[in-house]
Amino acid sequence: MTLSARRANGESSATRITDAPPRVLVVDDEPELRRSLARLLLSRGMGVLTAGGGMAAIDILKKEPIDVALFDLMMPNIDGIELMERTRAERLEVEVIIMTAFGDVETAVKAVRAGAYHFLTKPFRSNDEVVLTVTKAAERRRLVDRTMLLERRLEQMEKFGELIGNSSKMQDVYRLALGVAPTSSTVLILGESGTGKELTARAIHQHSPRADAPFVAVNCSAIPVDLVESELFGHVRGAFTGATATRAGLFETAHRGTIFLDEVGDLPPLAQVKLLRALQEGEIKRVGSNETQTVDVRVIAATNVDLKGRIAEGKFREDLYYRLNVIAIVLPSLRERKEDVPLLAYHFLKKYSARIGSDVQRISQEAMRVLQGHGWPGNVRELENAIEHAIVFCKDRTLSPADLPLGKAPNRSSVVPVRAEIQAAGTGLVDLPYREAKMRALAAFEASYFNELLERTGGNISEAARQAGLDRSNFRRAAKRAKLGSRHDN
């Protein structure tokens, strides 16, 4: 990539807003003047390059970051005005000072109007005049560079990977994530279900030196307890029933890359011990093997449960918690950043209109008010689903409140029989022994409770568990015990 292309990408701007001395290019066909100016500027601590003509100057500007260029007005082949126009045409970001004889001042003034920073008449009135003019031009160049860089960063703050949002809370997330991305530090991402924990982890990986290596995402709560160790760390042949061949684990798959452990609070105790060793020593053991293997893996973990509460209950290791919690990133719920709802809504509108092949292009003001007034218990994931649903059912090019699934009565077909069961159970319980009556009443209550809670949260187990005050694993087991979980698993 040429320097001019790098400059178009903002690379030179980033390098020039430091406190390094200004870099100056002196272009004049008179060797003695070039040498004299170079000595003067070098004596004032500036970096100096020289060129005897326009083509040589263009070559230097394409290869070197230059703050200020002094162009002689009258030069053979390419004069100072034409040379300045060439720098503009090729997007070479540099402040130009035109040097001219006294009789050509009118031409020099025209050059300033055309974009030159200033002009100097020869012979120069004093060395201080030259140094001051160059210094001021360099300051202006760096101010412009700094402004351009800040504008690009503000644009970047609206989106980080697939995370969308321009609220102050999301900008805080972006700054923290961008800061930790170049390192290998372990990151713990906290937040409710649907806030974008995996998207955050992927974005950190993509902005890290490991971006070309694997990113392996693991839902710890979705792996059967007796297979967690094998999935994460692998196993050798014969390690357990069904282990017919040696198999590498996900840590080995993620070697030199990143492993994302979602719902890390659901890891069983023995897997926690092995994870702690992997974090401390960079070593793993396959199930059934006594040999250790070294792995280079960055760990990013996430949870929507209170790990300190788990520690107090004896369900999570305190030493593992502190190993994971090196850098904590807390994702805000959507109700905490409702100013991002329009930005997100239009992002999903564009995404799903293209995917579905719809010509829906707008969201009505009434529909947007509905979106901004909703509580979003399912967070960004719920909003995404709502927009996709609305696009499918929208009959014209603008979404209306009627297209949105929000506020519509949920399907209660499964609730009515449960309530009827409670009522039916209640009428005949006194005819049963106490223990049996209690079991029937409890079963009917649990069935009704879990069913209605899942209906209210749209089948989102993590959010339903949060509202019930249970961790995800216990909620799932209780829901299955009530013979309802299988209908709402996600």
Image (cartoon, rainbow, N blue to C red):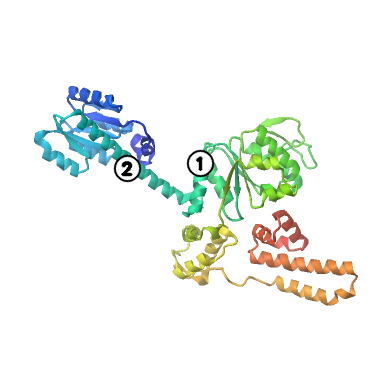
Q: Is residue 186 left or right of residue 175?
A: right
Question: Which amino acid, mark 1?
Answer: Gly
> Vertically, is 374 above or below 328?
below
Question: Nearest the camera: 354 or 273?
Answer: 273
Asked if one can make out residue 229 in the rendered structure from this viewpoint, the answer is no
Q: Position of residue 428 (x, y in %)?
A: 85, 76
The percent position of residue 123, horizontal first and vertical second, equals 13, 29
Q: Residues within 10 Å of mark 1 (few under 14, many from 20)?
A: few
Q: Nearer the viewer, residue 488 or 344?
A: 344
Determine the CA span between mark 2 and mark 1: 24 Å
- Mark before the other along the chain sequence, 2 or 1: 2
Where residue 120 sits: x, y (%)?
A: 17, 34
Task: Count numbered badges in the picture.
Answer: 2
The tag on residue 144 is 2
Left or right: 37 with respect to 434? left
Determine crowd level at label 2: few under 14, some 14-19, many 20+ residues with C-alpha closer than 10 A. Answer: some
Callout 1: SS: helix
Mark 1 = which residue? 179
